[in-house]
Image: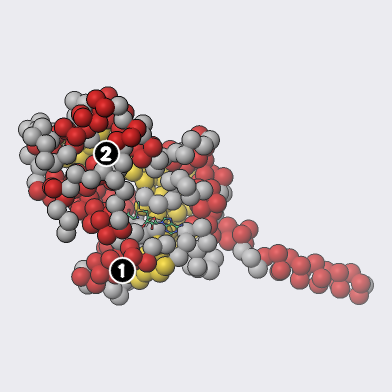
Amino acid sequence: MENEENSTSSEAPDTDTYIQRLMVFNTLREPTLRSAIQALQLPSGSRGLDAGCGIGSHTLLLAEAVGPAGHVTGLDLSPEFLVYAKEIVEKAGLSEQISFQEGDVNKLPFDNDTFDWVLSVDCVGYAPLESLPLVKELARVVKPGGSVAIIAWSSEKLLPGYPLLEAHLNATFSGIAPFTEGKSPELHLLRALGWFRDAGLEEPTVRTFAGDAYAPLTDDLRSALIALFQMRWPGVESELTQEDWAEYRRLCLPESPDFILSHPDYYAFFTYSMFHGKVARGYGSRTHPISPLLRRIGQHLLLLFCMSV
Ligand SMILES: C[S@@+](CC[C@H](N)C(=O)[O-])C[C@H]1O[C@@H](n2cnc3c(N)ncnc32)[C@H](O)[C@@H]1O
């Protein structure tokens, strides 16, 4: 693994580096994702889709939730991520319960009503993907009565004592990019209840789950937070004032004597918000590509019947 402690780069990483950061970062978020997944109460033995599964770290949690009689399909656009995902699943001895497929969440390579549930973690809900058509597409592949859920990172406080610097970092392009592209407020992740309602899902709900970390940090949590700083605020130098950049380097780089993660009172928290809705009976028939054809056949039969009387 890359030596995170010595990494001072704030530039966009290559795929391997990004994957390593995701793996290390997982230590921080796993307990929170586990709580959110438990709250979904996925039926034991059910079959589900993890849309935008990445390296599959939470796909394991989903397989755990549905038990040995269940099955999870992990789908992602990136073949590189799927290579890691398959390795992780093999190592965990869960290859029978989890399979992976390359594909696009905009056009899922599955028939209507294939799964009992579908979940997307940190994928659907963020720009540049357009959310309402995506929620409809997720719902299309779920059986009536099944569920659609989006879990997404929704906030954090990582620099205790430095709220202004943190606000400035979060106002940079990379700080703000996961949540908005300067488009209409309806496209913001925290408006997802509206997407679920407009997609025709029943009983839309949202719950927020918090995770935290505080000193003294274990080595794993320290590495996870370093990875998070690097993923959250890459390439921010050109958007900060000189003073903020100097402060960022003083507080956020591991080699600095004032590195904030070494502070004896360090405390951070973050939240994941989970949006959930149920697929109505007959949902598939509204979006099923065969339905216009069936309608036309019905119209012809009706015409024949009328002509024969
Ligand atoms: C921030 S990562 C999250 C990955 C994983 N869900 C996690 O939480 O660790 C976003 C993931 O979405 C995938 N992705 C982005 N656009 C996609 C698309 N159109 N179809 C499928 N996957 C996509 C990326 O390849 C990446 O793995």
Instruction: Depth check: give the residue in front, 303 or 157.
Output: 157
Q: Nearer the viewer, residue 222 or 168?
A: 168
Q: Which amino acid does label 2 sit on?
A: Phe
Q: Identify the disc placed on residue 83.
A: 1
Residue 3 is left or right of residue 168, and the answer is left
Query: What is the basis of the colouring in this image?
Result: secondary structure
Q: Please, is residue 165 above or below residue 7 in the view? A: above
Element type where label 1 sits in the image: helix
Residue 241 on image: x %, y %: 30, 26
Image mark for residue 116: none
Quadrant of res 168: top left
Q: Is residue 44 left or right of residue 116?
A: left
Judge the density around disc 2: few (<14), some (14-19), many (≥20) Cα neighbours within 10 Å. Answer: some
Q: Please give the residue where the numbered disc 2 appears in the rendered image.
A: 270
Q: Does the residue labelled 2 lie within 8 Å of ligand 1?
A: no
Image point 36% across, 52% down: which residue? 121
> In which quadrant of this rendering is ligand 1 seen?
bottom left
Q: Distance between the residues labelled 2 and 1?
A: 29 Å
Mark 1: give few (<14), some (14-19) or many (20+) Cα within 10 Å: some
